[in-house]
Amino acid sequence: MNNRDPFLHRYFPWLLLAGILLNIPGLWLDIIEPDGALYATIAKHIVLHNDWVNLYGDGHDWLDKPHFPFWMAAISYKVFGITGFAYKLPAFLFWLLSLRYTYLITRDLYNEDVARIAVLIYTVALHSTLANFDVRAEPYLTACITGAAWHMLRVNARAHWLHIVWAALFAACAIMTKGVFVLITLAGGWAIYWLITKQFREFINYRWWMVLAICFVFIVPELYSLYVQFDLHPEKVVFGRTNVSGVRFFFWDSQFGRFFNTGPIKGKGDVTFFVHTTLWAFLPWSLGLVGGIVYLLRFEKNRDAIRWVIYGSTLVTFLLFSLSKFQLPHYLVIEFPYFSIITAYFFTELAKRSQLKHLVTIQTVLLVLTLVFISGLLYITRIEHGIAAAVIGLVIVVTACLVHYRNAMQQLLFKGYAMAAMLYIFLFQFFYPFLLQYQSGMLAARVIPEKDSHLPVAAYGSFSYSFEFYSPGEVKLIKNGKYLNDFIDTAPCYLYTTAAVADSLIRSGVDAEVQASPKHFHVTRLKYGFLDEKKRSAVVEPRYLLYIRDEHTL
């Protein structure tokens, strides 16, 4: 394979455009609970109160995550209004930025062909696309890490001094997104590279210390906000106790406290979790990644040591996640640009030796298995328009298998994209719209008319982040039954609750009208009983939206 593969030069823009388009439909789907809706609600509170310092969520002062993603979402709300699309848009733009920086990093460390393939791989990697639909912090974090990483490569190359500032800015935004642990991700690869090449003087090179110093200047807004909200108010109850320092939580408990399981939020972990998670989260390229890692261990030990900036960062971050007690699949997304680079390099090395045919066979098998999986799921769930979904999948598979390919690389990438197209069309056009029919809080909130946005709204007995976000105004969370009567006294008002509570209130004489009774299921914790159309009615529960009039008796 030459450094300028004519196939990649000609078709790269079209495949990239197709991959980006496959990610876009998720922007218009409603926000799914729990985390995405919670984060969207926190940003909503910023805009409603014009308070950019204090984060408020889940009914109390909120300390779990730093401010940067919420600031970005709140700015978007200011421009586009408080909508699900406005919440997801800035994260999507950051994801596009991460594609650009993935290309730049790979181009500088390898060549343009590897860079193009790496970007194509990253664009449709499964959990990367899911992160653009179910938006948390990862799109922001990934863009900031890759941005800082490329500018650090330019700093190392003694490029213009502005790269020091840009590296510091991206690193600071990453820290203000997830915490100071990202410095381990950014610096770990460099430390390994300097040790391998015995460049010990780089540990005291003033450029790197300037990056760090400027970075800490850029995070002053985060530290100020935490200090004002928590350190100046030791009386606030956070994590069940008072005298909680927001600054200390940011620097220690939020990340290292979790890693050592000594912080206020504790978890359980399995060191093999991210190994098997990667096998599905990085589809359709998972086996290529495994092969790429094996290839690096066998053949890349003494070649182009600067690439260990990427390999080392990947290794350190993966080990950090695996040893941590907090393990969720979306954590892996920040590794995807580097996973893509490793996989793309492996593909190009095999292509040089005309040895891609086995991977092409595997990709064909995965394509067919995906169709079988989707068809089986459609049969079980009886999703509306399921036949259309199955036909679309079948057409994609047949087309991908009948197309005449010029070389094995073209076939490998096209079949990977065919699998992605089939999967994401199914997810975004059929499966997630089906699931969102059972996100009762969102459905109930949309019944509240805009003209009633000034009326009190509360949730009791069953709280829903999507109800809080999609309600036209603010929502009060009532956790104790003794405060329920006080809220009813504010009538007219709206109450979102369970069927049992609604029935009890109406039987006790409260003048309440049922406005909506949507079916409810925790759609991010799928079970066979819910997926099976024949058993679904036994596991879903109704939720009620009551309109309580101002004439009532208790």
Image (cartoon, rainbow, N blue to C red):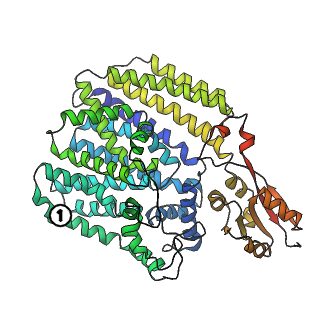
Q: In the displayed structure, does residue 531 sit left or right of residue 262? A: right
Q: Residue at x 32, y 49 (%)?
A: 319
Quarter of the figure with residue 336: top left
The residue identified by callout 1 is 207
Q: Residue at x 27, y 53 (%)?
A: 149
Residue 520 image position (x, y, % from top left): 70, 49
Residue 209 image position (x, y, % from top left): 20, 66
Image quarter of the N terminus: top left
Between 195 and 124, which is closer to the camera in this rendering?
195
Image quarter of the C terminus: bottom right
Q: In the displayed structure, does residue 257 sit left or right of residue 292? A: right
Q: In the displayed structure, does residue 55 sit left or right of residue 502? A: left
User: What secondary structure is found at the residue carrying circle 1?
Assistant: helix
Q: Residue at x 48, y 48 (%)?
A: 131
Above or below for 549 versus 366: below
Name the kind of residue labelled 1 in the image. Answer: Arg
Q: Would residue 153 be seen by someone viewing this image from the given angle?
A: no
The crowding category of the residue bearing disc 1, from other C-alpha atoms within 10 Å (few below 14, some 14 to 19, many at least 20), is: some
Between 330 and 214, which is closer to the camera in this rendering?
330
Q: Would residue 270 be seen by someone viewing this image from the given angle?
A: yes
Count up the numbered dots. Answer: 1
Above or below for 502 versus 296: below
Q: Residue at x 44, y 31 (%)?
A: 417
Residue 103 image position (x, y, % from top left): 30, 43
Residue 194 image position (x, y, % from top left): 15, 53
Q: In the displayed structure, does residue 2 sit left or right of residue 55? A: left
